[in-house]
Image (cartoon, helix red, strand yellow):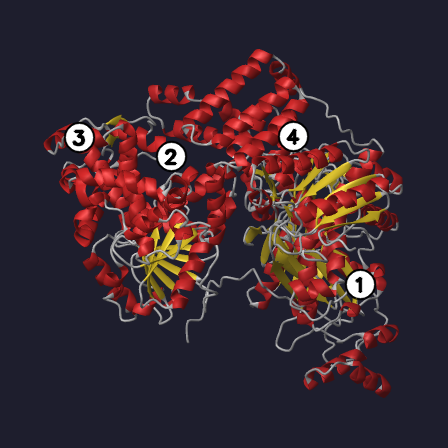
Amino acid sequence: KTRTHVNYEVKEDVAVIRMNDPTSKVNTLSVQMQNEMIEVFNEVLANDAVQSAVLISSKPGCFIAGADINMIQACNTSEEVTKLSQEGQKMFARIEKSPKPIVAAINGPCLGGGLEFAIACQYRVATKSKKTVLGTPEVMLGLLPGAGGTQRLPKMVGIPGAFDMMLTGRNIRADKAKKMGLVHQLVDPLGPGLKSPEERTIEYLEEVAIQCAKGIVNKKISLTKEKGMMQKVQDYVMGIEFVRQQIYKTVTAKVMKMSKGLYPAPLKIIESVKAGLEQGPDSGYLAEAQNFGKLAMTSESNALIGLYHGQVACKKNRFGVPERPVKNLAILGAGLMGAGIAQVTVDKGIHTVLKDTTVEGLSRGQQQVYKGLNDKTKKKTITSFERDFTLASLTGQLDYSGFEKADMVIEAVFEDLNIKHRVIKEVEAVIPPHCIFATNTSALPIKDIAAASIRPEKVIGMHYFSPVDKMQLLEIITTDKTSKDTTASAVAVGLKQGKVIIVVGDGPGFYTTRCLAPMLAEAVRLLQEGVDPKKLDALTTGFGFPVGAATLADEVGIDVAAHVAEDLGKAFGSRFGGGNVEVLKTMVEKGFKGRKSGKGCYVYTPGLKSKDVNPDIEDVLEKYKLTPNPLVSSDSDVQYRLVSRFVNEAVMCLQEGILNGPVEGDIGAVFGLGFPPCLGGPFRFVDTFGANKLVEKMRRYEEVYGNHFTPCQLLLDHAKDSSKRFHK
Amino acid sequence: MASMLMNSLRCCPPVNPAWAVQYATRSLSTSVQLHAQVQTKSKKTLAKPGVKNIVLVEGVRTPFLLSGTTYADLMPHDLARAALQGLLHKTSLPKDAVDYIIYGTVIQEVKTSNVAREASLGAGFSDKIPSHTVTMACISSNVAMTTGVGLITAGQCDTIVAGGVEFMSDVPIRHSRKMRKTMLALNRAKTLGQRLSLIGSIRMAHLTPELPAVAEFSTAETMGHSADRLAAAFGVTRLEQDEFALRSHTLAKQAQDAGLLSDVISFKVPGRDTVAKDNGIRPSSMEQLAKLKPAFIKPHGTVTAANSSFLTDGASAVLIMSEEKALAMGYKPKAYLRDFVFVSQDPKDQLLLGPAYGTPKVLARAGLTMDDIDVFEFHEAFAGQIMANLKALDSDWFAQTYMGRKVKVGAPAMEKFNLWGGSLSLGHPFGATGCRLVTTVAHRLLKEGGQYGLVAACAAGGQVTHYTNTSSYFNVMDRKVILPVCVSGPCDGDRSIPPVEQDSGRTEMMQEKTVYAYTQSGVTPTLSDCTY
């Protein structure tokens, strides 16, 4: 029978084992891949002509991206998953003990199970390509490295290094991996030669790896590295049990602080590492396999895997290829948003024009873009030359010159319908017919803005989140007049900018702002009821939000919040009530506009990380004081009051067709608004928590506060029929 | 005669009939023994109607020495002076007969930033002769020459001295930026208090010196590293590189011993001995070469100290004139400078690949094929770089994928290639190498009786020059410059044949000339015609 995923050829006395999953762009450790690998490995071991082996991927730009998630999801019990893990452990144990040395030749991502495979090999050679990253991202899926990773990594890179890798899941570039001792040798990527650079680079990597394999066999390369002084000291220190216990304690405390105990995976990782180091490898491997099984069955892991799939789905353009690619993009308004958009665009090979009305505004924006790129230079992710070269694609200007070449204009001017109308008219007078006009607004309905346009089919909403270079989400809003090509083009630009994209229907607040507004209204009411901002933050972060409600209001801007609350309040009526908008307005009058003005709910001192509650808001809150009802004011009730309004509004967006589906709803809430990732988004939360339980709570709040808490029809439907689920 | 004429016509590719006639006529002036060779050429001459013929009258250089040896105590302009004085001596040129002097250099001595001027004054040239310094990494003196050619073509000048100098025994090492900032502020400080506080702000970190960059500014990659990657990209083995390095040293030694390196002048170094020979030529054995460890990419790289060019001190100079002027002054020019091309490409992956890009271009400009060229002189930065360029020239895939050509032009024949050694063995004073290449092509054409020569060199940044002539040619790319020189066939060497053709007021020597192309460099006219 022919093998499709793994094959090998013998070059002199080295077996070159090549992996390539023909069904996918990336290699994963699927059942098929594993089975063929074992088969090949057995043949290599049995082949007397072979002295050593090289493991390499023939897929350009990917070693092994990880284990096959579907394989884990197909399991129904933790025992099944534990068994999977043990099979993986067994296979890698054989690799590790192989009498014929195996060299892993890594080009492209080497993640998760791929990394565990590589570190089971005797030697690792990696290319310095930007695509080559090593890491254990399992924790981000609520899992742990379940094929020996928790056992081998501490030995390879030291206990602190291993914890850092496994608990953060971050990607490690090849040069860093070499320093950490994760790979032995680096190979430079090659440029044009007698073959394409990608092809020749893999070939070169293979040649070098073969040399290494031979070197190991004829003892020119030693596998036991001479330890440096630092290493010896570190080993000695780590040999002291007391020190190790302190490390476990410190790491656990840090994890608890960061995760609020809402994520089980990091704790299980610590547990597995500890078991291996303190009780020996047998216990360690067993703990790893069992913990892996347990984690795979948790709702947190389920939620995180759901988000992973959702994110992948939202990185695709379901509207097809646009008729013409955007090569020249103009941005109106060099404020925080405009400059942020410029920053994520200019380094993607798109010529970017940043236009403002004043020199001061423009220079501030240009400085923001420069700073963003310069920070990357300082972190050495780009060179100073790359920074300068990138900036050469940015033009700052005060007039409309060159707009006749623009393929797309994104306006990020002040949120005022009249100004937006003026701008759209000015712009349409100078842009070519094919040019798309995108408006960056957080709440104004796009159709109202498009009313001033002479070609509404080219008008679309692109709602970015601040800070643009950090926030992954882009919410694209289409009106019923927006053409499909316009949408395709906007999505294409967003994807180029590296965004995760949801495309939603038009309406006040679209999806994200509309979900956030009732929650913030509830937060204001809680402040009025005497809940201290710090307490409010603690309760929201305790539920899993990365940022507390009071801090979030400061970040968004109290003025923006007031603006949005008022607009949406008008559009949706009393349902959006709760806190008194006057509280926000009074704060704005006093100059407490949030972080940007230095004061909001908190006082911000530049350079200081800690912040104190703004003492002056007490007067404001005193003025609008409400008496809390003890029936619905327990800590848990406070949390559910906030969350249920958010979730209810999200479900209503799906009910009204604003949302295309629950997946985009979850992605938008998590990536744009920081909805707790461990809950997987509002829709998965309803599935997991139970719609009936949620409705029950809401009814209780409804009795006290009225229609702010009336569950929407779709939510009621789900509550009635427990077989109805948003996610299959 | 008639049959000769017919032959010439037949073998000429379809060209402008007027030219064909011209070539035919010109062939009459060709010597008989050269005739057979001329017949196989695509073209008989590279002269273009309405374009001035520009000639290389003479070229000299100081011996190229390993840096830190006999020249160690000099300054760059001292070396340049030596070359200029050598040129004066060899040509008996009156010191005020030059219209303009141009020098190329890479690492500048800050005290003599216009080293052309300091050297020409010091060499005793008239102080009325303007001079300026140019820089374009390893093709700086190529730029000096092409600038001169440009000045002659533009009708600005008739007589140009161009040259290049590099002095690696001493390079400017600066204080750190922090220290410089403090020192400059100290200059401006008015009170003792201010001064003391500034002095007090100096920390250990201020004292770290700043060495001249060895890496490409744009990519932060050193050239040796880039060369190693280039060699790997083209699958050039360590063995091939060592063999080429050995060839270079062996040929250089032979040329030196046979006295072929006649462009080298002897130089009495103040306080030291007289230097008359290059001192970097060290033919070794393959076994010796194989012992060296890779110098840049460790442990699996292939570029070693022995198959790379070494740090060198040296200077060169050439006398370039319009043909009329040269003849009027009674000179016997050595070659026509016909055409040149500068090209540039990606400074990261194709840093040293200029010759591969420039060669086909300059050939196309001159209307020649690879086979027409009798003498190739390519700058040997690294053996791996040379081999990679040869492989690129010989690859249809590369020609199609990266150069937009249908087919390859082919690699130069090794029996025509760098026969008197190259930068690997003779040394490579960055700024001075271009003139050495052009002079060598002229001398080889004369010695070997060839008609066309081609020079190519690569330079940091990814540029190249090529020159062709019945004598020489030049071309510049990204950071490498190739200077292609074509020397016309029946040159000087063949005085026995009297000039026959009617325009043979020109000397017996040259048939052909060089072609230039500017792709990257431009000339800024001081006086422009603004009439539209």
Pick whichever of labels 3 and 4 is earlier in the sequence.
Answer: 4
| Three-letter amino acid code at the position of disc 1 | Leu
Residue annotated with mark 4 = A181
Residue to which mark 2 is pinned = A544
What SS does tag 3 mark?
A: loop
Q: Where does the image place residue B269, in percent across and percent down from the top left?
A: 72, 37
User: Which residue is the site of mark 1?
Assistant: B445
Indicate the amino acid at tag 2: Gly
**Mark 3 residue type:** Pro
Query: As drawn, is B212 to the left or to the right of B16?
Result: left
Q: Quadrant of the rendered structure where residue A400 is?
A: bottom left
Q: Is residue B261 above or below residue B151?
A: above
What is the secondary structure assignment of the residue under circle 2?
Answer: loop
Check disc 3 and report the residue beneath it. Answer: A628
Mark 2 and mark 4: Cα distance apart in space: 35 Å
Chain under label 1?
B
- Give the mark, 2 or 3, whose residue is nearer the N terminus: 2
- Based on the displayed image, in which of its 4 quarters is residue B25 positioned? bottom right
Which of pointers 2 and 3 indicates the residue nearer the eye? 3
Q: Are marks 2 and 1 on the same chain?
A: no
**Mark 3 or 1, closer to the camera:** 3
Q: Foreground mark, 1 or 4? A: 4
Task: Kindly state the secondary structure of the residue where label 1 is placed.
Answer: helix
- How many other residues sit within 10 Å of disc 2, few (<14), some (14-19) or many (≥20)? many
Front position in the image: B90 or A640: A640
